[in-house]
Image (cartoon, rainbow, N blue to C red):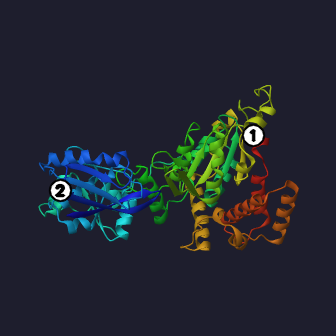
Amino acid sequence: MVAHAYTVAFEGVDARPVEVQCAVTAGVPGFAIVGLPDKAVSEARERVRAALSNMSIAMPSKRITVNLSPADLPKEGSHFDLPIALGLLAALEILPGDEIARTMALGELALDGTLVAVPGALPAAMTAAETDRTLLCPRASGPEAAWVGDCRVLGARTLADVVRHYTGDAPIAPSEPGEIPAPGRLRDLRDVKGQERAKRALEIAAAGRHHLMLVGEPGSGKSMLAARLPGLLPRLSPREALETSMIHSLAGLLSEGGISRLRPFREPHHTASMAAIIGGGRGARPGEVSLAHNGVLFLDELPEFPRAVLETLRQPVETGQVMVSRANAHVMYPCRFLLVAAANPCKCGYLTDAGRACSRAPICGEDYLGRISGPLMDRFDLRIEVPPVAFRDLDLPASGDDTATVAARVEAARLRQAARFGPEAALRTNADAEGRVLEEIATPDSESRELLLRAADRFGLSARGYHRVLRVARTIADLADEDTIRRPHVAEALSYRLVSPRDA
C-alpha cells in the first residue's frame, strides 16, 4: 500500500507543494527516504522512529520507502518530519489515508513526539489555501499561519494529539490569528536639536521612499536622525504586511505568530558578510535587504562595509528584487526598501574642523569616501551634510515639528501617490515611477524645466540623476499638496542632489 501526504519545499518566498509517498513492502527491514533530501530530512527517520516508539507504536519489520515528489526538487529543513510521520501512519492504516491526503503538514518532531515550531508556516498556509487543503502544523506556528484566512489551520502540540484528531477521539480546534504586536514608543523627531535641513530630508525620504545619504562628523546626530525615521513612515498596508511577514516567517522572525504593521528597520553592522546582507548561505536564506522589504535598511559607517558588499547593493536598490544564485539554488527575493546611509567625512571624522583634522586633510576625505563608488553614490536621491551642533544649542528648547505632525504630512503625501497610481498598481511611491509613468506624473512647468535643464547641463547630471531629481521634486510637491511641480520644488530637489558627500 502506498499512502500520500503533502508538505512544501521553499524556494525563496514561494512554497512549492511536495507529495510524500510512503510505501510499506515486504523485504529486508529498513527505512529509506529518497527524493533529494538534505541531511536534516534524511535524519527524519530517526526522529519519526523515536516519536512512534514513545507512542507505543512499533515499526513493522518490513521495507519502508518514503519518496518526496517531485524527486528533482531539493528538500531542505526539519519540517518534513510531520508529513513523513503522517504518511507512515496512513500506510500502516492507523490514520485514514483520505483525510491525510487532504492535509498539508509541516513540523519538526522531538524524540518524545512533541511538535517543534518551524519557519515558513505563513507561505505554507498560502500554498495550502491554493491547493484547497487544511494545514497541520505545530501549535506554536498555528497563530502565524492562521493569518491566511482562506485556509483552515490546525495547530497540534504532539504527534499523539494528531492521531487522536484523525481518529475522532479529540478533534483539534482551528488556530486563531496571533495578536498584532502593539507599537512601542517611537523616538520623537523633536529630540534632535537643530539639524532642520536633515529633518526636512528625512520627511522627503519617508514620503517618496527616496534613498538618503548623511555625512557628518562623529556625534553630529546621523544615527539619531536615522533612528527616528520609522516613526515617520505610515503603517504597512495589509498587502505589504503579508509580503513582509512571509519573508520574516522564512527567517523565523515572527514573534508568537503576530504580524506587525510597523515597517521593518534593519541596521546590520559593517562587519556583516555578503550572504548576511544580500542573502545566501545554507538554503539561500533571505538577507538584510529582503528583511528590510517595505521598510528601512540603515547602513551606518557606509565606507567601512566591504566594497564587494556595497557594489552588490546597486542592482537591488534599482530593481527592488535580488536573485540569490548558488550551485543548487536560484532564488528570487523581493527587497523594495528605503536605503539610509551614514558616513564620516574622513577616517578620523574631523575633515571640516581645522583644529582636529589630521595632517592628511583633505586627501584623507577623498580616499575615505572614495570607497563608495560613483554608481552607488548616484543612487542616493538625497545627500545631506550633517554639521555638528554647538554645545550651547543643546540647552535650547526643542524646535521644529514633532514626529506625529511630520508623519501626518508623510501619510497625506503617500495617499496622494496611492490615488495617482491606483490601488492595484505595482507602483506605490514616487521612487518607483519610471519611463512613461514618470513623464506623466512629474511634468514640471516651463520655468521649472528650464531650471532643471540648466542645472543638468552645468553640473553634468546623469540620466539617472536627472530622473531622480524629478521624482524628488514630485514628492516635494505632494508634501505641499500641489498638483504641479513648480520652480521651488525643483530648486529644493536640486539642492539635495548637487551637494556631493565627498565635498562635505
Total labels drawn: 2
Q: Looking at numbered disc 2 in the image, what kind of residue is underneath it?
A: Ala
Among the 4 quarters of the image, the one containing residue 269? top right
Residue 130's place in the image compared with 191, above or below, is: below
Indicate the quadrant where residue 429 lies: bottom right
Tell me what residue is drawn at x 70 percent, y 63 percent: 471
75 lies left or right of 341 = left
Residue in the foreground of this view, choosing between 90 and 491: 90
The answer to whether residue 293 is left or right of residue 184 is: right
**SS of the residue at dot 2?**
loop
Which dot, 1 or 2, sits closer to the camera? 2
Do we see residue 73 in this rendering?
Answer: yes
Is residue 193 visible from the viewing direction of this image? no
Residue under pointer 1:
370
Q: Quadrant of residue 152?
A: bottom left
- The kind of residue tagged 1 is Gly
Q: How far across and down, in percent of the image, does residue 480 sit?
A: 68, 65
CA distance separating discs 1 and 2: 70 Å
Query: Considering the numbered disc 1 on the image, is that residue within a helix, a strand or a loop?
Result: loop
* Observer-nearest of 391 and 423: 423
- Using the image, determine if residue 482 lies above or below residue 309: below
Disc 1: CA contacts within 10 A as few (<14), some (14-19) or many (>=20): few
Local crowd size for mark 2, using a 10 Å CA cut-off: few (<14), some (14–19), many (≥20):
few
Which residue was labeled with disc 2? 26
Q: Quadrant of the C terminus?
A: top right
Residue at x-position 69% and y-position 37%: 344
Where residue 434 appears, x then y in whole percent?
68, 67
The percent position of residue 218, horizontal first and vertical second, equals 67, 34
Percent across and percent down for residue 338 are 60, 54
Q: Earlier in the sequence, mark 1 or mark 2?
A: 2
